Amino acid sequence: MLLKDFYTLDIIENTDVNKYSAAITLNKDHAIFKGHFPGNPVTPGVCMMQIIKEITESILSTSLTMVSTTNVKFMALINPEVNAKLTLDLEISENEASEIKVKNTTSFEETVALKLSNTYKRTTS
């Protein structure tokens, strides 16, 4: 986990072929929210992208490096004091070039907060 104690991974479920649903709880007391933004905390988009990467790594049991991001749509602010529990739905596939493609929808309650597609490659040592 890049940001220690930023979130807790509550559960990951395989919902269909190459489809997963993860539930996380954001730590509303994490230091990052003191600066982003004082009195009105908002989860940084880059942190959400990191969470998606970490969950994908957990599912695939491999380290990944991001190659590209497309179709990024931040649709609602994620305030951890109001909506700390998030659901991340991921569709994961691998193409002929050994790239890992991830389509993600992140939501809280009935509100979609984020949609994006990421492409990763396996990290080699």
Image: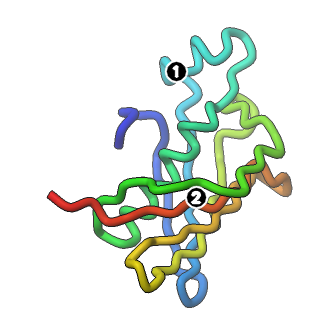
Give the farthest residue toward the left: 125
The numbered dot on residue 32 is 1
Residue 22 in the image, given as x and y percentages of width and height: 56, 63
Residue at image mark 2 = 23
Quadrant (top left/top right/bottom left/bottom right) for the C terminus: bottom left
For the point 55% across and 90% down, the residue is 17
Total numbered circles: 2
Q: Residues within 10 Å of mark 1 (few under 14, many from 20)?
A: some
Front one among 110 and 60:
60
Q: Amino acid at mark 1?
A: Ile
For the point 62% across and 60% down, the residue is 88
For residue 18, side relative to residue 72 (left or right): left
Asked whether disc 1 touches disc 2, contact meaning CB atoms under 8 Å apart, the reply is no
Residue 113 in the image, given as x and y percentages of width and height: 77, 48
Q: Nearer the viewer, mark 1 or mark 2?
A: 1
Residue 5 in the image, given as x and y percentages of width and height: 40, 34
Quadrant (top left/top right/bottom left/bottom right) for the N terminus: top left
Compared with 31, 59 (above or below) is: below
